[in-house]
Amino acid sequence: MVSHQQGPTEDQAGQGQGDSRHSLLDERSLVPYDHSHVDRQASKDPEEPGLTSTGKQPTHPREESNVVSVSMERRRQQAVDKGAGAGVLTKLFDSKAAQTRSKRRIPGQQAYIQWMQARNRDPLNPSAMDLMNFLDYGLEEKKWKLATVHTYKSAILQLFPIKRQLEIKEDELFRDFMKVMGTGTSKRLHNATVDLAPILTGLQALGDNHNMSMKDLTAKTCFLLATCGLLRADDLACTDAAQCKTLGDKLELVVVFPKEHRGGQKIIKTTIIKSHPV
């Protein structure tokens, strides 16, 4: 079997352009947002060396919250000063999407605020070097992944006014640091060997599909679909059987709430499994 996945195309604005079965969805995903790719220990562990090496007590969560609140209020006021109407302000700061984005920024912002305040530095008025030192601390001491470092950098920059963000981004040393960050390290991938023989033997032992129990037939079908379609377990759970269909020698599966997003919005993903001669 050969798998081919299709998703909606995007225009320059990043919005999906699929057909009616690929329309963007505004409903909350059945699959909760996965924070596992972000190192939350940086914001939760008050004992980490970078925060207690100065001998100071860990920052109280209320102090961190106040810093974030001041930043958010400043951004809102900037929008008002530029002429933003009530509708624009609601979409930028009070909508469900805006609140979700704000929650995703919290781990990186809290880790940065703790790190700065432990060094008697103002989190809202840093130098470009402050941010470089913090990111390097996370990369070298906390062993954050590069993706985590970039996520934290973007979240931290949102704390500052636009002018300050541009000053940091345009700093020559900061730009050079972001280019070379992590280039001196490499990680060898472990290519594991997986023996499928026991699984295939087990499937054959189940017997003919027509005489198989519904439980065994469902398990066998899910295994084959996931293997041939390269689907996650949650993709299978979110596959809408009513929208699935066969097209000649092809099976089209419609996943209505995948983890993937396009332009920041949820999508409907189509996976096509083609027949292949054995």
Image: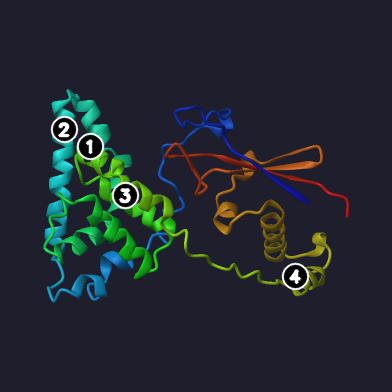
- Mark 2–mark 1 CB contact (< 8 Å): yes
Marker disc for residue 162: 1
Residue topped by disc 4: 196
**Badge 2: how crowded within 10 Å, few (<14), some, or many (20+)?**
some
| Amino acid type indicated by mark 1 | Ile
- Mark 3–mark 4 CB contact (< 8 Å): no
Q: Residue furthest front?
A: 172
Residue topped by disc 2: 78
Identify the mark nearer the N-term, 3 or 4: 3
Query: Mark 2 to mark 1: distance in Å?
Result: 9 Å
Marker disc for residue 174: 3
Residue 110's place in the image compared with 257, above or below, is below
Name which residue lies at 22% across and 37% down.
162
Residue 228's place in the image compared with 72, above or below, is below
Name which residue lies at 42% across and 50% down.
179
Q: Nearer the viewer, residue 240 or 158?
A: 158
Secondary structure found at label 1: helix
Name which residue lies at 37% across and 49% down.
176
**How many numbered marks, from 0 up?**
4
| Amino acid type indicated by mark 3 | Phe
Query: Mark 3 to mark 2: distance in Å?
Result: 25 Å
* Mark in front: 1 vs 4: 1
Identify the mark nearer the N-term, 4 or 2: 2
**Residue 90 drawn at (x, y percent):** 23, 33
